Amino acid sequence: MTSKKLWQRYQDWLYFHDGLGFYLDISRMFFDDELIAKLEPKFNKAFLDMAALEAGALANPDENRMVGHYWLRNPDLAPPQFKKEIETTLIHIDDFVRRVHHGIIHPPYEPQFTDIISIGIGGSALGPQFVADAIGPDIPPLNLHFIDNTDPAGIDRILTRLKDRLKTTLVIVISKSGGTSETRNGMLEVKHAYNELGLHFPDYAVALTMDGSKMDEEEQCDRWLAKLPIFDWVGGRTSELSSVGLLSAALIGIDIKSMLEGAKIMDQATRIPELKNNPAALLALSWYAAGDGKGEKDMVILPYKDSLLLFSRYLQQLVMESLGKEFDLDGNIVHQGITVYGNKGSTDQHAYVQQLREGVGNFFATFIEVLEDRQGPSIEIEPDAMSGDFLFGCLQGTREALYENGRASLTITLERVDAINIGALIALYERAVGLYASLINVNAYHQPGVEAGKKAATQFLALQQLIVKVLRETPEPLSLESLAEKVHTPDQVETVYKIVRHMAINHRGLILQGDLHKPCEILVSYRTESA
Ligand SMILES: O=P(O)(O)OC[C@H]1O[C@](O)(CO)[C@@H](O)[C@@H]1O
């Protein structure tokens, strides 16, 4: 395409939102009028699906659930029974945060909380992490730390760093279901650390969970410092603008009202049922065009701004957990999804952009450009050129270099990274995922594959418990094969081997004898008291 035609295409497809100062340019995606015509009926259906969802339809049929994250930033749209609880929760967050900041709520023996540990995983961690990193103040009123795994060493790292400050640390435990083992484990480990210091954990703990969840009942969260609800109709990966994301954000000094306002403005823009006037629909079109509606191209997220580093991790769950599905809504096997990865520019130009430019062409890039370089003046690095101009040049150069080599890209341009724009960005992608899911006819709001993984992990732990029991009852060393027989899994010798190897190295009383190069010759036994 000649540069004149390209300039025309740029102008024809450029989306601009006046109120937000937000641009979306999809001119470097490879789609034509034929595709637009083909997708028109699908888009019409997607807009209707979305309107029904917002009106309270059971948009998550497998779980028989409503999908209400759009109501969080505009409670007037919510069914009357939910409006009140959204508003009350916001008031509670506001009140709790104000009282913590003023030391009215404080740790038992100290005047003020200094730190927060936020324990949660997936949608109960990725949003809060992204937002804190993107717009958390440089010197926050409280320092925020995350435990988002059941990795003992990772937990120790946080606890060791906090050390004496544990006695002034607020613990927020976030689990919608209240039954996620990683979060439960993190909570029990942290609780143990408080107990060791003679501190009464409930005086430091805040629960964010569904009323009556497993965690709520087992831990009697009503006796904790505070408890806030996560609503049944808010999915984990779309929960950033619920209590899940808002509480920690407000505690570290982020303007959550602006974040909600930004999302509300973007919601209005993405509700418009016209492709060209709806930025989320334009994103969905671009994704469809890139991967032929089958996810054939990966989505590489390249924000040219350090503060947006975690956006790709956040999007990874939002997009891949929503779209990565075996079956469509009619029960056909489709194996859908779009792979998402990324980091930040220009850093990535010195890492994997080499492959993007010259290697396998299995992706499309999403550039995120931020117009405001910094608050405050910049020095001249070269005549009339500041650091920000170099960053800008790197983005434009990479976009051009990719296009020259037939690699598609789209570009989102924000004026600055602030609470309004972060709220808007979250809302934009939530809507784009919903629309794209309608185009490809999948349920974006369930995650059956994750449930299967959780079940497998539970079976694995049950097997481990049985192995320990059998070894304790068996005085003589056993080969792996006979151990597998005894625990009724003769076809899972490899799993048995891995369990005993892991337990042996962690001093859990197991002894492995024999040549470790030859698992089939290993003998395993349990260390008795006298041994
Ligand atoms: O908040 P919960 O219930 O602990 O779930 C955490 C995450 O686990 C999942 O259910 C599965 O990964 C996610 O959808 C969710 O965000």
Image (spheres, rainbow, N blue to C red):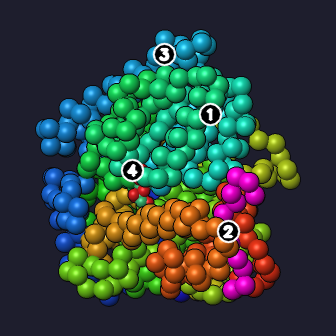
What residue is shown with label 2?
525
- Give the secondary structure at mark 4: loop
Q: Does the magenta stretch include residue 525?
A: yes
- Find out whether the residues at labels 1 and 3 contact each other: C-beta distance under 8 Å: no
For label 4, count other residues whose C-alpha is less than 10 Å away and answer few (under 14), some (14-19) or many (20+).
some
- First to last magenta residue range: 520-531
How many angstroms separate mark 4 from mark 2 (CA)? 34 Å
Out of 55 and 31, give the one closest to the viewer.
Answer: 55
User: Could you say which disc has been placed on residue 105 in the image?
Assistant: 3
In which quadrant of the rendered image does the C terminus lie? Answer: bottom right
Please give left or right for residue 68 compared with residue 199 in the image: left
What residue is shown with label 1?
193
Q: Is disc 4's CB within 8 Å of ligand 1?
A: yes
What residue is shown with label 4?
179
Q: Which amino acid does label 4 sit on?
A: Gly
Q: Which amino acid does label 1 sit on?
A: Ala
Out of 270 and 171, give the one closest to the viewer.
Answer: 171
Q: What residue type is labelled 3?
A: Ile
* Mark with earlier residue (1, 3): 3
Q: Position of residue 78 (x, y in %)?
A: 19, 43
How many angstroms separate mark 3 from mark 4 (CA)? 28 Å
* Mark with earlier residue (4, 2): 4
Kindly give the residue lying farthest to the right in the view shown: 382
* Mark with earlier residue (1, 2): 1
Q: Is disc 1's CB within 8 Å of ligand 1?
A: no
* Mark with earlier residue (2, 3): 3
Quadrant holding ligand 1? bottom left
Q: Which amino acid does label 2 sit on?
A: Ser
For label 1, count other residues whose C-alpha is less than 10 Å away and answer few (under 14), some (14-19) or many (20+).
some
